[in-house]
Image (spheres, rainbow, N blue to C red):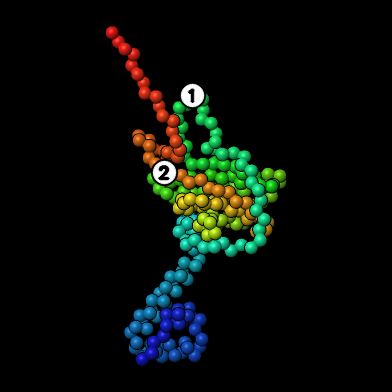
Amino acid sequence: MSHYGIGQWVDFARDLAPEPDSVSMRNHLAEGCPDCREVEEFFQKLGSVCRNMAGSEAPERVVRYAHAIFPMRQPARPKRSLRIPIQLIYDSLLVPAPAGLRASWQVGWQALYRAGDCSLDLRIEPELQSSRAAVIGQISNHLLPEIEMGNIPVYLKSGKFVVSETLSNRFGEFQMEYEQRGRLQLCVYLDNGSKYVQVPLKKFAAERPVGGDRLNLGPVAGRKKKTRPDTQ
């Protein structure tokens, strides 16, 4: 007795099999083949579950997690894109500590870049005691702020491979969660991919400070040991 392949049973369950094949497969099931009957029943149940889920929209957080764990791939974009020079306007790690403080703790990193008429506001929020982080950003036109910056492709790349990707909403906002690694670049493609902005992302080592609940994301100035005056 010859059996049918899994691909054929998938088409059969979805009513996509050609009519002659569909008739032959029904006759095959009627002959009592237990192996094919088990495969056919499985894909019938799977098809029913998928049809019931088709009307439900996955939560945005679940979609972000799926993008974060999806295998890296090469980005699909135009081969010829003009890279726009960027200018760093603000970097939270370069801001001096307030006067009188010997040490400071920073949780995350915030920066503002400008490239032509485009402004890119970024923030990285590392997870506590984890190598994972989230990048939150907003793209805007600082010359014409009323322009909507929706559906702009944003890629997080490691070398030539895409780690995560998303599209900005109509306010130019976007968010991606990812596993931290070295030499990550955030790429924003403008004007239908003809131009792009590339920004390096900082990597943070999450540490739990003794007696604290915040991340140690940089060196901390050492404190001088206090000495007691000699007493007679």
Q: Can residue 132 be seen in this view?
A: yes
User: Residue at left 34%, top 87%?
Assistant: 33
Secondary element at tag 1 = loop
User: Residue at left 42%, top 40%?
Assistant: 215
Alpha-carbon span between mark 1 and mark 2: 26 Å
Q: Can residue 62 be seen in this view?
A: no
Quadrant containing the C terminus in the rendered view = top left
Secondary element at tag 2 = loop
User: Residue at left 45%, top 40%?
Assistant: 217
Quadrant containing the N terminus in the rendered view = bottom left
Q: In this view, does 166 lie to the left or right of 46?
A: right
Find residue 177 and report its horizontal and vertical position in percent. 48, 52
Q: How crowded is the residue under tag 2: few (<14 C-alpha within 10 Å), some, or many (20+)?
A: many
Picture disc at residue 100: 1
Quadrant of residue 35 within the rendered picture = bottom left
Find residue 57 and report its horizontal and vertical position in percent. 50, 61
Of mark 1 and mark 2, the one earlier in the sequence is 1
Q: How crowded is the residue under tag 1: few (<14 C-alpha within 10 Å), some, or many (20+)?
A: few
Q: Is residue 228 left or right of residue 24?
A: left
Under mark 2, the amino acid is Ala
Q: Is residue 160 above or below residue 230?
A: below
Q: Residue furthest right?
A: 143
Q: How many marks?
A: 2
Picture disc at residue 206: 2
